[in-house]
Amino acid sequence: MARIDSFLKLGLAQGCSDIHLAVGVPPMLRMNGDLLPIKFRDLADTELESYIDEILTATQKKHFQSGNDLDFSYVAEEGARFRVNLFRKDTGPGATFRYIPSNIPTLDGLGLPSVVEKLCDLHQGMVLVTGSTGTGKSTTLAAMIDLINKTKAVNIISLEDPIEFVHDSKRAQVIQRELGTHIHSFADGVRAAMREDPDVILVGEMRDPETISMAMTAAETGHLVLGTLHTTSATKTIDRIVDALPAEQREQTKSFLAQSLQAVVTQILVKAHEARDARRSLRSCLLHAPSQNASCPTRLTRFRHSCKPAATSACS
């Protein structure tokens, strides 16, 4: 067993969402939003480096030793799955492990509003799940993909960095591709996906203009595109998309948003008032509505807001 698994096992026993390892401090656990140290010595540079080396492949070691950050998924000896980010800072290496539950949560289990289930019935257009890091975007998208997988005979192509929840094909075919392992970039992955007869394309993160542009093209050409952005409101999401693209494309982008952006679901996590050891998720939804004006060539949007609190999973 890799020595690092002992910290991961302890973290899971405590019910944490993340385990942080860094030089000069003891291992720390993210517990209901707070970062708490465990009773252990401060980690030394060579000590943490040796822990990390035990779980890396030769290719991963070469990449990390070249000075690059590294994102990958790791399965501990007892079967628990984690999303891992390795990095270097002034005092040495660091690592963050986020627990990924083995069971894919349902939309009901996450307390998501019923409108999110209706979004899974769409055949084309773009649906974005947004929020800051750690608010449960990947968990929400996994629940949406699982519902489509159970109910529709379609081809789902999921582009992720790294692969988190593992989907077995049910009624649908689910193809999961990982950045750095199967594709060089999200933009390349979307470009390739459009040649692979997709019905649904999940873009793990729309982080650059090329990826946003390719995702827009996919949504306009008859595919349902699900994606994420690190924005904290629906209006900021619109601004981010428009501002990300070159000035000469902005009018075209606005036309796309008016016609093909079906919904923006924004999530935030707050500490529950009734319990010190729990967090709740608040969500707001911007939904697409048909225009009632026949002379208007585009459709309008309207806001709906959901303040329904929902207990979050460990990896939200």
Image (cartoon, rainbow, N blue to C red):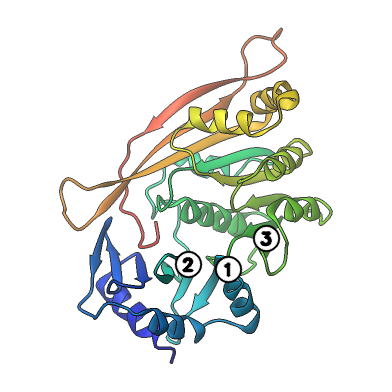
Query: Badge 1: few (under 14), some or many (20 or more) residues near its Cα, within 10 Å?
Result: few
Residue 118 spot, x, y in % from top left: 54, 40
Q: Mark 2 highlights which residue?
A: 88
Instruction: Determine whether 95 is above or below 5 in the image.
Output: above
Residue type (three-letter) at the residue carrying disc 1: Gly
Circle nearer the N terminus (3, 2): 2
Circle nearer the N terminus (1, 3): 1
Residue 172: which numbered mark, if any?
3
Label 1's element? loop
Label 2's element? strand
Label tally? 3
Q: Along the horizontal axis of the image, is 21 left or right of 79?
A: left
Residue closest to the eye, 150 or 163: 163
Name the image quarter holding residue 71. bottom right
Q: Residue at x 72, y 43 (%)?
A: 210
Residue 3 spot, x, y in % from top left: 39, 88
Q: Mark 1 highlights which residue?
A: 67
Instruction: Determine whether 87 is above or below 231 in the image.
Output: below
Residue closest to the eye, 87 or 103: 87
Tag 2–tag 1 contact (CB < 8 Å):
yes
Q: CA distance from mark 3 to mark 2?
A: 40 Å
Residue 278 spot, x, y in % from top left: 23, 55
Q: Residue at x 63, y 78 (%)?
A: 62
Residue closest to the eye, 76 or 7: 7
Q: CA distance from mark 2 to mark 1?
A: 8 Å
Q: Along the horizontal axis of the image, is 18 left or right of 182?
A: left
Residue 76 visible in the shown view: no
Where is the C terminus found, in terms of image quarters? bottom left
Residue type (three-letter) at the residue carrying disc 3: Ala
